[in-house]
Amino acid sequence: MGNISRRQFNRRLSQGIAGSALFSSVPLACAMAGTKSREESLGIALVGLGSYSTYQLAPALQDTKFCHLAGIVTGTKAKERIWAERYGIPAGNIYNYQNFDTIADNDDIDVVYVVLPNSMHAEFSIRAAQAGKHVICEKPMAVTVAECDAIIEACRKAGVKLGIGYRLHSEPYTQEVKRFVREKTFGKTAYVNAEAAYRSAGNPDQWRLNKALSGGGALMNMGVYSIQSTIYATGENPVKVTAQEFSTRPDYFKDTDETVTAQFQFPGGATGTVFTSHNANANSLYASCTGGWFSLKPANNYGPLAGESSNGPIQFKHESQQKLQMDDFASHILYGSVNRAPGEMGKRDMIIIEAIYRSISEGNRSVPLELGNMGLV
Amino acid sequence: MGNISRRQFNRRLSQGIAGSALFSSVPLACAMAGTKSREESLGIALVGLGSYSTYQLAPALQDTKFCHLAGIVTGTKAKERIWAERYGIPAGNIYNYQNFDTIADNDDIDVVYVVLPNSMHAEFSIRAAQAGKHVICEKPMAVTVAECDAIIEACRKAGVKLGIGYRLHSEPYTQEVKRFVREKTFGKTAYVNAEAAYRSAGNPDQWRLNKALSGGGALMNMGVYSIQSTIYATGENPVKVTAQEFSTRPDYFKDTDETVTAQFQFPGGATGTVFTSHNANANSLYASCTGGWFSLKPANNYGPLAGESSNGPIQFKHESQQKLQMDDFASHILYGSVNRAPGEMGKRDMIIIEAIYRSISEGNRSVPLELGNMGLV
């Protein structure tokens, strides 16, 4: 990196200063080749060591090229030693929720990944930004649109990058669907159905079933996937939504929505239908276009995904989606590649979620949406 | 048939007089064996010689065991000779819409199959019943619930059998789904999604696009299939429905609904979602149950259908659905086997259709349904 430190380099790049000048003499392929050295790999701190961090993110970060697991932030003392031993994390890179802000002084940490319950996303994303760290915020971005705005503003003010944990935008099946739509491989989408649901029957005290922590049930958790599916299968944001809620196990789903269905109108004429539930299993995307069709099934789990179109099977080698996602975000920071899931995408989805809840609370009526191109990548 | 004529026998059976007495001495297997003789095969007259009669029903009637094509009723003079020659139909068995009622005097005709545009179903089903003929009425049964009542009453009064042209109830994939539900193979259904749609781009003057003839668009035509799917995938009638209409090609769909989505609540807790359209292609049934899942895709075309479940592939030999359907109805008349698609089923679906249109016209609000077990077979 010559006479500027990696950290200064990243800062400059992220502020758009260094990029073009540097790369005019250093070919990208060279800059990116043979990575894994600390110099070209960003340090990630995971905030919240629940099952997603434990079983998906941390293992994936062992295989990433442009970033690595450098630190942890946890409220559970017992997890500190386990993680430190398993991943060789030095004591200085271990934080709790009280001393978290001192992470600002830690040069090992470039990116903070917020993997906490939804209601804590805004607070920790903002504190991370204020500590000068780039932010990945798990989906859903927050529990209100106002919180999304606050996160975006905090990141803007701090000059740090912000990404939402929409891993699917980094994996090839979803990218293929987006390519179909962009290149009109099958013409214009006329109908898209997207399902994202699983049957929950475990611990009734889990945070996902607690509205104060989750902000909502199936819709906040799985619904986001099906909303996203309809958007990338049309390439547009919806202009109108109607929605319904169904409840059959109120003893278990005391506090959060069990099943939600929603119907979207897209400006190009497509109809989108969404099913999400914590009381059934469904995981698919189907689109009928003017000149053919495509489908993914499963469409939104951790993979391997599978797909088919009127042109034949869709097949890609399976890789960890989380690995791809984090390398994409690190590459965005390091090399200015596209931010596949920017904050505006998370905010847009929260606007849609709020409209769905509004339709439900107002007798299933149609709610208009004015999103323009917000969050379309 | 001994000392009563076949015709008298049928009449008595249909009135429930002869059945048990006769069959106590004549095993069903014997009575049904080696058919095709006129004595044991009912004569069918097709009313309306459009493409469904031409390409599906008439060919199927060449392969049926318990019935055969005996007559035609057409308003198009030119078709008389073509059909008479192709199928060897005697001049005395050819009717037009004016002289149709004289079919009462024709002993060759036992069953009248009404294959006319929807708005004519009631008139010709009632005239057929009044002529003393058993009636198969194509789906949708009519264009209003009141018309369905009139058909049912006319058949009751005349002592003739009434079946609706729901061919799928006679084919093995649908029967397998009904068996899954009846036997709780996968437990209780929690979610069912049913799609029935095709993209219409042909003659804009076709009767299906003319509300005076069709009574409605996609919902009346294809929607009936998806409504039916949700019902046999749950084994219940819905208790509540919300619905939405989408229109993107108003120049083509001047008069009838282009796309309709609906959401059902079932008394056992299942959520049902329905998509039907004349502007997209979709043909599937997916059900998530407490202990597994099943799906058909395609689910409702003329076949071959295909299916899968959490237990593996669903596979049956393909046969003409129309052949199976008509033999089932003939067997119902001749031998008292179950009527797989009675008039009450058609009426129930029309009640649901009217509720869907009502939800749409009243701001997508929830409309209650009080169907009990109506039409469940």
Image: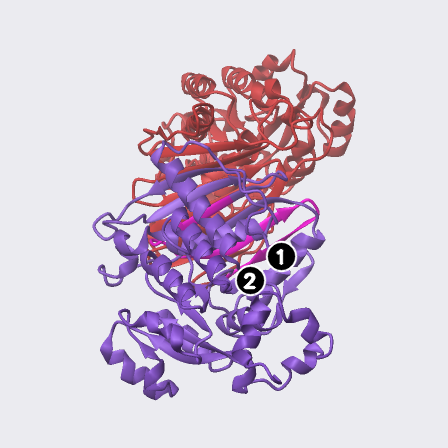
Chain colours: A purple, B red
- Do tags 2 and 1 sit on the same chain? yes
Q: In which quarter of the image is the C terminus of chain A?
A: bottom right
Query: Of the residues shown, which amino acid type is indicated by label 2?
Result: His
Which portion, as a residue range, is magenta? A273-298
* Disc 2 target residue: A169
Chain of residue at mark 2: A
Q: Which mark is residue A124?
A: none
Residue B327 visible in the displayed image: no
* Disc 1 target residue: A178
Say above or below: B255 vs A136: above
Q: Is residue A239 left or right of residue A189?
A: left
Pick out the residue farthest to the front. Answer: A3
Q: Is residue B132 left or right of residue B106?
A: left
Question: Magenta span has A275?
Answer: yes
Q: Residue, x 47% and y 23% (percent of image)?
A: B361
Q: Which secondary structure class fits the magenta region best?
A: strand
Query: Of the residues shown, which amino acid type is indicated by label 1?
Result: Lys
Say above or below: A11 vs A121: below
Q: Residue, x 45% and y 21% (percent of image)?
A: B148
The 10 Å Cα crowd at callout 1, few under 14, some 14 to 19, many 20 or more, is many
Rendering coords of residue B181 (x, y %) = 37, 50
Q: What element carries label 2?
A: helix
